[in-house]
Image (cartoon, rainbow, N blue to C red):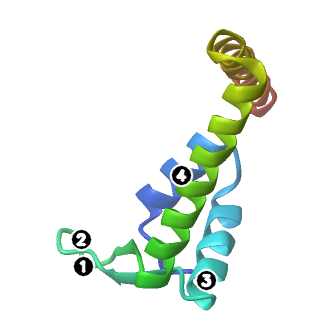
Amino acid sequence: MVSVASRAVDGSGKRLAVSRQAVAQAVAALERHDYVSRVPDPVDARARVIELTPRGRQALRVMRSNAIDVEERWTQILGQRRLADLRKSLQLLLAASDAEATDAASP
């Protein structure tokens, strides 16, 4: 069992609309590949805090850079206004999916 603070796992799972077990497995995989490490929580001795490793910080920098490059390319293709419309449409779709997932999880 992954030793992650249950409040962090539960909160992450709810935000991502996935199970606590799925979050724990993802954290374990990231840890195996040296993207994150788990350290003692200074506030709660029973809990662990998940931190990015240097490799994880580098991966995050690369992902952010790639996202910026993609957004710049899409802006060239669509223009500012159409890209803003696309972003709003995608946010609406995500909100609808979140609502459906919440409804499905309710008894």
Find numbered disc 1 in the image and state the secondary structure of the residue it sits on.
loop
Task: Confirm or deny contact between disc 1 and disc 3 (CB under 8 A).
Answer: no
The residue identified by callout 1 is 45
Q: Give the amino acid type for the residue marked by disc 3 in the picture.
A: Met
Q: Residue at x 63, y 59 (%)?
A: 20
Q: Residue at x 38, y 74 (%)?
A: 51
The span from disc 4 to disc 2 (Cα, nearest Å) is: 18 Å
Residue of label 3:
1
Which residue is more in the foreground, 105 or 100? 100
Q: Quadrant of residue 27?
A: bottom right
Q: Amino acid at mark 4?
A: Ser
As drawn, 84 above or below 58: above
Residue at x-position 61% and y-position 81%: 28
User: Which residue occupies the foreground of this view, 13 or 66?
Assistant: 66
Q: Nearer the viewer, mark 4 or mark 2?
A: 4
Q: Position of residue 70 (x, y in %)?
A: 69, 43
Q: Is residue 96 visible?
A: no
Given the image, on which type of amino acid does mark 2 rest? Asp
**Separation of residues labelled 3 and 4 (CA atoms):** 17 Å
Front one among 52 and 98? 52
Disc 3, SS: loop
Residue corresponding to mark 2: 44
Query: Percent position (x, y) of residue 4?
Result: 46, 73
Q: Which mark is residue 75?
A: none
